[in-house]
Image: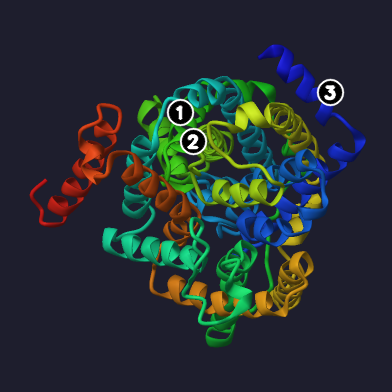
Amino acid sequence: MAEQLIAGFSAAFTLYNMAFIMLGIVLGIVFGALPGLSSITGLTIMIPITFYFEPVTAIAFLVAITKGGTSGGAIPAILINTPGSSEAVATTRDGYPLAQRGYPIKSLRMALYSSVFGDTLSDVCLILLAAPMAIIALQFGPAEITALIILAFTMIASLSGQSLTKGLIVTTLGMFCATLGLDPENGTPRMTFGVIDLYDGISLNAVTIGVLALGSVASQMVDIWRYPTSEHVSFPKYDKTKQALKFSEFRACLKTLARSAYIGTFVGMLPGLGVTLAGFLGYAGAKRASKTPEKFGKGHLEGIAASEAANSAVCGANLIPTIALGIPGNLAAALLIGAFMIHGITPGPFMMQKSGTMIYALFASMLMANAVHALIGRWGSPIWVQVLKAPKGIILPAVIVLCVIGVYLPASSLFEVGLMFLFMGVGYIMRKLSFSLVSFFMGFLLGPMLEHSIRQTLELYHTISVLFTRPTALPFMLITIFMIWRIAFKKKGKI
């Protein structure tokens, strides 16, 4: 493994690759700092552009956006008590009070260093666990893969929203959208309605950019129209001479950082749990273990460290099931699967065998991105503060233009642009009705894989009951049944 990682560093450590890692970090921080956009919006816009990049550079660039966006969301959370993304909600509990006490820059630096710390430990776990898990996954047959995907769907549907029913509905909708086009086995058209442009199925770019980026833009524009407010942003006054984060203050939080990084890594490995949950679990764990829990919520550095280390640790860990099993851990990983496919790489157990050099180059790029993240975040603090002052009247139209360009360029098709605007409406409705976007995308991405594995299972065993008779598939099905049973009875107040 050490030799492969060294070879990965050799392939990744180029000026060209480093330049795009730096650009990705900057874009991620900017998107994360703008409330309502987040790194997910940045990913959806930039994925089509990476079609023209080398695979290593493309994936490293997109991962860097994710890393930057995670810490970028803490900037408005700390300065104006408005999280740039959902994962930074827990950071507001101590970040904003500390900023109001006159230490905004110290708060931002603690958030940054904690984010890099958790992210780095998570990346190390990814490097150590991806290959062994891929080896185990190679022993899986169609029945085991089917059972595993069903379990993933259940976890995502139940944990990504307030309602299991809503989660299952949008998961099914995502799977339905993925079935449009030619049948993969016999080549017959399915629900194409005679439209030749649909023979290749619905474009991943049109779906992701329409639902995520434009759906968010539409929601914000409607809110601005309905509830017009002043866009003036005021920041707390502070003494520049008292903003340094002392090493002793950071060292005092090391136990909390390690605990939160462990929590975030564990959460990231399980599909559907998400970074928001990781942030709250890390914060709750730190408060419970602290000798002075009364300081939490009043501007405590340890509270900032706990939430930021936990939510950032998800970034690397969510790629463990993605690389080893081909099952994304969260929405960002699901988008990265689309990026892998654009470059002809199929995530899953064979990924380590067929694209081993590229994977270890990605690992190396992730470690380098952490170092770049720390430097750029530290030097750019005054700039990121100014990002918050950008009026949405300028930002949102620019995002719309980038979305149209991002969908049109790869395929040169106005039909896909039309699909993008159609799915913009879908994304807007899903947001207003509190349907889980994660469940929809998991259904869209994993639906074809589930269909293929079920067909293979029926070809080999001639019955679907094999999911309950094979000893390697049975545990997954039992966990699935238990989760559904627990959720159903919990609603009735029995447990």
Task: State the count of labels.
Answer: 3
**Mark with earlier residue (1, 2):** 1
Amino acid carrying mark 3 in the image: Ser
Say few, some or many: other residues with alpha carbon within 10 Å of mark 2 (under 14 / 14 to 19 / 20 or more).
many
Amino acid carrying mark 1 in the image: Ala
Q: Residue at the far bottom: name it.
A: 226
Which numbered tag is attached to residue 325?
2
Q: Residue 237 in the image: x percent, y percent?
A: 70, 54
Can you tell which quarter of the image residue 166 is in? bottom left
Q: CA–CA distance between discs 2 and 3?
A: 27 Å
The reply to whether discs 1 and 3 touch (Cβ–Cβ < 8 Å) is no
Q: Closer to the camera: disc 1 or disc 3?
A: 1
The reply to whether discs 1 and 2 touch (Cβ–Cβ < 8 Å) is yes
Give the position of the N terminus as an image quadrant. Answer: top right
In this rendering, the answer to whether 15 lies above or below 234 is above
Amino acid carrying mark 2 in the image: Leu
The foreground one among 375 and 218 is 218
In this rendering, the answer to whether 57 lies above or below 412 is above
Q: From the viewer's perspective, tell me whether residue 42 is left or right of residue 138.
A: right
Which numbered tag is attached to residue 137?
1
Which numbered tag is attached to residue 11?
none
Q: Residue at the far top: name it.
A: 2
Can you tell which quarter of the image residue 116 is in? top right
In this rendering, the answer to whether 186 lies above or below 399 is above
Q: Secondary structure at mark 1?
A: helix
Query: What residue does disc 3 label?
Result: 10
Say few, some or many: other residues with alpha carbon within 10 Å of mark 1 (under 14 / 14 to 19 / 20 or more).
some
Q: CA–CA distance between discs 1 and 3?
A: 28 Å
